[in-house]
Image (cartoon, coloured by chain):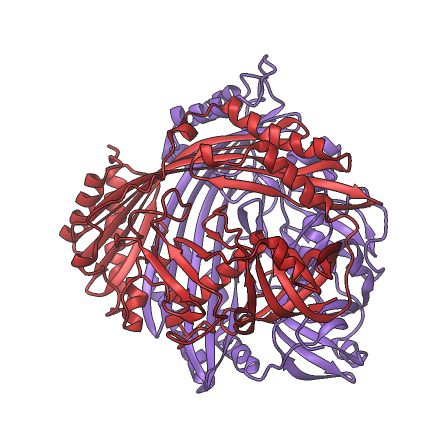
Chain colours: A purple, B red
């Protein structure tokens, strides 16, 4: 399957392995340690329904090549949206200027290799499905959301899918390719109870085919979930402010890990020693109950890749093991500079961008407790099951993520829904307060987008039900 | 054979789409050259330079619409995309509200908003690197406590945007921008803090000097050292300009036609009503010369203009494009935004709070106990309900003086109340961006810790 992508680029654009070698040689003509070429061809589609009509359909096609040259800790980069030899050569020439040491370096002749992983052999990617079938799906979700309750007003739903061919050639002789499908189905609705307006959202997908939305995550389930959330929020009371015991539900609340430790453990920050986790390998950064991993090699997942965007196979990296920090997420550049193992976490938004160490699917392993026991153990606290987004300052370690569906826990029982509030904590400290980890690990349904340095990429998160003995809740009620 | 990146070509493509079956069509062509250098510890870290181009096409067939985009500008490829767009449009539903603006509304004169600076285009790579290095050096030289940097550099961009449609509108403008940023890291007692300072302008001559940026970045970073939380309490909160602009962004989301017609805003149904303190006037102006949010015509070809959104506390206008205006029975305010693909959105021009009479020092002096916010983290703003909850860093105010740095707290409230509690407005409005604000004092928010 990986040769499919390589064949795609060679045939479509009339390039050969010899051309690739020449281009890499141009990139290294002024010197440098390493160069790579990232070829990308991406076709994306969106269709959306609103006010019960199919308001629009869109399709975008983009293609190009990014050329990178690395010398020491420096990177030169240029790209072209014309996949033909002379344009790429000019880009390679531009990128080569980062190396001013003079003297050229000979790249190793590239040799196409098969990927070891085949995580998304999708039979009917949504990009191959005709528009009418996608329209059917969004109409079904829309109908269920509207029927859920008479107070549901606006319903908006969309399906976005993409098919991406990539080919990566590097001066160490690597030539790999990948075919990367992706789809995401999202639905949101507004509940209106006499002027009290609330919103509910649901979504999911991954590197999956059309049948996913028949078998795993139906439009009906999405419509019901979004409507349910909006209706519950109509009753939400003001959230308390201050430190509370917090129970997080499984799945998307794993965004806690993404913000609290994920970014802080990206190796560029640690190599530069600007992360609050710098120098903490071997030390306790979480309670013993916590084992946190990043795994890009899980089948079908939104955050998964057969090879990262530097052509390196993805894998499971244990970040925190029984509370102890074990390692960082690396790309080629930073693994080299830190003299550590590459972990297959070099990712980029597109051929226009330099790869950086990024997350794939980041989650905590399951523990022993049941969700019911965990909730029962809380005298007064917050139970948060859905979140919007989050953010982190990796230097101070300060992070925040915003609950969109949460409830009070009073005497071990889930009671009133509360308005969304931001939970905050500090990366190297907050997970030390994890006092219970459930047996119900779930990964999120396939909606995550992560931003870093202006580059957005798809990611996954996950967590079992967990209890944190103390977390700041940014409510308004004292 | 490649297409020419001209207005005339765009216009002929729009007419071609109609010839092929569309009832109306819009073409967007963009091309851009970008440069970016990041520096660290006195050396270049990354160096990027490239050009790109893209074409977008939206077609309407009796109220049904679809759009396509691509960067392969060979004529055959574009025409084949055009046929695909027409086919896609046929599968959508007719929407009476969709459609090009009325022919009488298009911009006829193209004001020169002075958006382009040849000095930026002529700046040599070595000079750009030098600016970035100087900014970092100025931060480093400011104090021994500045021990590291996490990013920092110089960016410049130059581009042209073309819009044409089947009603005969064709417009084009070019613009440049440059930005310089320093991100120092300081350390004290084993705890690190980082902050940043930057400037971004359309003209090189208007950019702060690297030394000004570096020194301010260093000062902001140092003042975070030793930060600690404070107990839960309700107090006045002062938003420094760099943070207050986030509130203007929240106001934009609340008055955007896209939120209003979808009933996804706490300002739905409030046109003409008092929604904020009488001191607050919020303006959107797409015609400001050299403004980062300025352009001679909006994403649909309508003239941009100056719109008073909130006038002394009263909500006078939403910000609208043609579609959302029609939905609400109003007129477009010339705020259509445009990506290469998709229907027009709503976009701010240069949006700001009109400056008030007080210096930032006076504002702080007026607070006996409160919180001066210099950083906000998290996306906890619900535009539908106005619920507001974000994690914050800043400086505690005691008896009108800035005292110790604060971190590890949240500020919470509701935008409906916050707007009504704007008690003082600073005179320090600076267009360091397209959405900006002077210092603001909000009478009461809940600090959580």
Is B392 rendered above or below residue A178? Answer: below
Q: Residue B145 location, x and y as percent?
A: 77, 38
Q: Nearer the viewer, residue B5 or A90?
A: B5
Q: Is residue B144 left or right of residue A195?
A: right
Q: Nearer the viewer, residue B31 or A337?
A: B31
Q: Nearer the viewer, residue B104 or A369?
A: B104
Q: Is residue A225 left or right of residue B6?
A: right
Q: Residue B68 location, x and y as percent?
A: 31, 51
Looking at the image, can residue B203 be seen? Answer: yes
Q: Please report the residue visible at 64 percent of the width from the left and 64 percent of the height from the top.
A: B237
Which quadrant, please, contains the N terminus of chain B?
A: top left
In the rendered picture of this protein, how many numbered marks are placed on residues? 0
Q: Residue A432 location, x and y as percent?
A: 82, 60
Is B405 rendered above or below residue B311? Answer: above
Q: Nearer the viewer, residue B235 or A324?
A: B235
| Outermost residue to the top | A103
Q: Please report the residue visible at 47 percent of the width from the left and 71 percent of the height from the top.
A: A188
Looking at the image, can residue A330 be seen? Answer: no
Q: Please report the residue visible at 27 percent of the width from the left and 73 percent of the height from the top.
A: B329
């Amino acid at each position: 399957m990986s040769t499919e992508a390589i064949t795609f680029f060679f045939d479509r654009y009339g390039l050969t392995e010899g051309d690739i070698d020449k281009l890499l040689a141009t990139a290294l003509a002024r010197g440098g340690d390493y160069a790579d070429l990232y070829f990308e061809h991406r076709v994306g589609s969106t269709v959306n329904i609103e006010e019960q009509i199919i308001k629009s359909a869109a399709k975008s096609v983009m293609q190009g090549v990014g050329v990178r040259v690395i010398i020491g800790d420096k990177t030169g980069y240029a790209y072209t949206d014309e996949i033909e030899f002379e344009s790429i050569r000019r880009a390679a020439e531009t990128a080569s200027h980062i190396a001013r040491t003079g003297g050229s370096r000979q790249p190793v002749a590239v040799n196409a290799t098969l990927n070891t992983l085949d995580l998304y052999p999708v039979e009917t990617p949504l990009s191959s499905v005709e528009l009418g079938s996608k329209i059917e799906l969004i109409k079904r979700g829309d109908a269920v959301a509207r029927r859920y309750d008479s107070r549901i007003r606006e319903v908006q739903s969309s399906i976005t899918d993409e098919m991406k061919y990539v080919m990566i050639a590097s001066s160490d002789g690597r030539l790999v390719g990948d075919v990367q499908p992706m789809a995401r189905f999202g639905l949101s609705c507004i509940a209106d109870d006499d002027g009290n307006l609330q919103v509910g959202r649901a979504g999911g997908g991954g590197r999956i085919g059309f049948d996913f939305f028949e078998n795993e995550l139906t439009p009906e389930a999405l419509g019901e979930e979004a409507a349910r959330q909006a209706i519950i929020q109509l009753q939400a009371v003001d959230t308390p402010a201050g430190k509370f015991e917090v129970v997080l539900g499984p799945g998307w609340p794993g965004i806690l890990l993404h913000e609290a430790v994920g970014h802080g453990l990206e190796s560029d920050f640690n190599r530069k020693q600007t992360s609050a986790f710098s120098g903490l390998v071997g030390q306790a950064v979480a309670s013993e109950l916590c084992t946190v991993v990043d795994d890009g090699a899980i089948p079908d997942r939104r955050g998964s890749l057969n090879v990262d965007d530097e052509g390196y196979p993805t894998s499971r990296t244990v970040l925190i093991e029984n509370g102890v920090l074990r390692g960082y997420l690396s790309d080629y550049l930073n693994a080299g500079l830190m003299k550590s193992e590459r972990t297959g976490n070099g990712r980029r938004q597109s051929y226009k961008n330099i790869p950086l160490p990024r997350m794939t699917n980041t989650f905590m392993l399951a523990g022993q407790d049941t969700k019911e026991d965990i909730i029962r153990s809380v005298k007064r606290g917050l139970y948060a099951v859905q979140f919007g987004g989050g953010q982190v300052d990796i230097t101070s370690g300060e992070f925040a993520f915003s609950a969109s569906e949460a409830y009070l826990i009073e005497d071990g029982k889930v009671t009133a829904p509360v308005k969304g509030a931001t939970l905050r904590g500090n990366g190297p400290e907050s997970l030390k307060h994890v006092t219970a980890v459930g047996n119900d690990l779930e990964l999120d349904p396939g909606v995550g987008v992560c931003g870093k340095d202006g580059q957005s990429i798809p990611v996954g998160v996950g967590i079992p039900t967990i209890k944190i003995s103390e977390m700041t809740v940014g409510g308004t009620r004292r | 054979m490649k297409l020419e990146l001209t207005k005339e070509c765009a216009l002929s493509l729009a007419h071609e789409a109609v010839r092929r079956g569309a009832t109306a069509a819009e073409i967007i062509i963009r091309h851009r050259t970008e440069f970016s250098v990041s520096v660290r510890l006195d050396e270049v870290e990354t160096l990027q330079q490239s050009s790109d181009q893209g074409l977008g096409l939206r077609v309407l067939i009796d109220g049904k619409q679809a759009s396509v985009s691509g960067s392969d500008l060979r004529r055959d490829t574009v025409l084949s995309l055009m046929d695909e767009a027409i086919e896609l449009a046929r599968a959508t539903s007719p929407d009476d509200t969709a459609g090009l603006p009325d022919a009488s509304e298009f911009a006829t004169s193209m004001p020169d908003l002075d958006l382009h600076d040849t000095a930026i285009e002529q700046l040599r790579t070595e000079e750009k690197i030098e600016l970035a290095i100087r900014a970092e050096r100025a931060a480093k030289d400011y104090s021994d406590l500045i021990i590291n940097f996490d990013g920092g550099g110089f960016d410049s961009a130059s581009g042209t945007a073309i819009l044409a449609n089947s009603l005969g509108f064709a417009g084009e403008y070019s613009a440049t921008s440059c930005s310089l940023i320093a991100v120092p890291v300081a350390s004290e007692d084993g705890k690190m803090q980082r902050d940043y300072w930057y400037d971004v302008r359309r003209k090189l001559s208007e950019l702060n000097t690297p030394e000004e940026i570096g020194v301010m970045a260093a000062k902001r970073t140092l003042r975070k050292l030793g930060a600690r939380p404070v107990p839960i309490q309700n107090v006045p909160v002062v938003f420094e300009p760099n943070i207050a602009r986030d509130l203007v962004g929240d106001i934009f989301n609340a008055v955007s036609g896209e939120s209003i017609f979808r009933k996804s805003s706490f300002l739905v149904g409030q046109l003409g009503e008092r929604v904020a303190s009488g001191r607050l006037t919020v303006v959107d102006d797409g015609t400001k010369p050299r403004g980062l949010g300025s352009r001679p015509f909006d994403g649909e070809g309508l003239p941009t203009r100056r719109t008073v959104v909130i006038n002394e506390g009263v909500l006078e206008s939403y910000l609208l494009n043609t579609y959302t205006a029609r939905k609400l029975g109003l007129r477009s305010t010339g705020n259509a935004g445009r990506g290469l693909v998709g229907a027009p959105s709503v976009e701010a021009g240069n949006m700001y709070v009109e400056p008030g009479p007080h210096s930032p020092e006076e504002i702080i002096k007026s607070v006996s106990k409160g919180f001066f916010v210099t950083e906000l983290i998290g996306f906890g703003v619900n535009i539908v309900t106005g619920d507001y909850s974000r994690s914050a860093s800043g400086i505690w105010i005691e008896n009108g003086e800035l005292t110790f740095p604060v971190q590890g707290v949240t500020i919470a409230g509701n935008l409906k109340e916050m707007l009504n509690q704007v008690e003082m407005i600073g005179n320090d409005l600076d267009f360091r961006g397209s959405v900006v604000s002077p210092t603001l004092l909000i009478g009461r928010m809940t600090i959580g810790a």
